[in-house]
Image (tube, grey):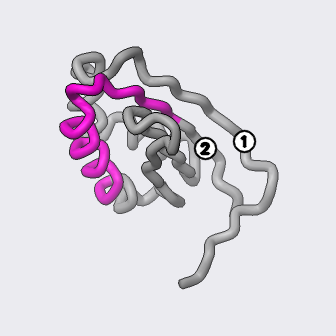
């Protein structure tokens, strides 16, 4: 099944807030993966800039993505985000053209 919604989020941390932000973002991963609409949810850091964090998220439906965005961790973080960031979060919705393939471990 191909996810209906894919999001890439880029967050550029203030250097003095990097570690605190990273701890918050890591907390989003387990919580988000437990949500029923989550297909996969991954946190990355740039190899060139240790202050740049990137989320890659796949959601079954747009409705389930909207529910995620209202979830407790995200909802609490959103009004406070600029205290951690050099600039606002960059969100980009993208469409998966290939079939979704889950790697078996």
Looking at the image, which is closer to me, 6 or 82?
82
Residue contact at pointers 2 and 1, CB within 8 angstroms: yes
Lower position in the chain sequence, tag 2 or tag 1? 2
Q: Residues within 10 Å of mark 2 (few under 14, many from 20)?
A: many
For the C terminus, the quadrant is bottom right
Residue at image location 53% in from the left, 46% down from the top: 56
Which mark identifies residue 6? 2
Instruction: Give the structural element (helix, strand or loop) at label 2.
Output: strand
Type of secondary structure dominating the magenta stretch: helix
Residue at image location 33% in from the left, 27% down from the top: 13
Specify the segment rendered in magenta. Answer: 9-31
Q: CA distance from mark 2 to mark 1?
A: 6 Å
Looking at the image, which is closer to me, 53 or 4?
53
Q: How many marks?
A: 2
Looking at the image, which is closer to me, 19 or 6?
19
For the N terminus, the quadrant is bottom right
Q: Outermost residue, front direction?
A: 48
Q: Residues within 10 Å of mark 1 (few under 14, many from 20)?
A: few
Instruction: Give the structural element (helix, strand or loop) at label 1.
Output: loop
Q: Residue 88's spot in the image, x, y percent?
A: 41, 17
Residue at image location 43% in from the left, 23% down from the top: 89
Q: Is residue 7 above or below residue 78?
A: below
Q: Is residue 76 magenta?
A: no
Q: Outermost residue, right direction?
A: 97
Tell me: 47 left or right of 27: right
Residue at image location 61% in from the left, 44% down from the top: 6
Tell me: 13 left or right of 72: right
Question: Residue under circle 1?
Answer: 95
């Amino acid at each position: 099944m191909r996810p209906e919604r894919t999001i890439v989020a880029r967050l550029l941390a203030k250097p003095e807030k990097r570690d605190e932000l990273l701890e918050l973002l890591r907390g989003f991963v387990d919580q988000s993966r437990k949500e029923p609409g989550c297909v996969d949810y991954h946190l990355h850091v740039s190899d060139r800039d240790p202050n740049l964090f990137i989320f890659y998220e796949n959601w079954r439906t747009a409705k389930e993505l909207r529910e995620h965005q209202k979830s407790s961790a995200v909802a609490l973080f959103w009004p406070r985000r600029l205290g951690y960031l050099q600039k606002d979060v960059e969100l980009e919705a993208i469409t998966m053209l290939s079939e979704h393939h889950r790697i078996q471990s």
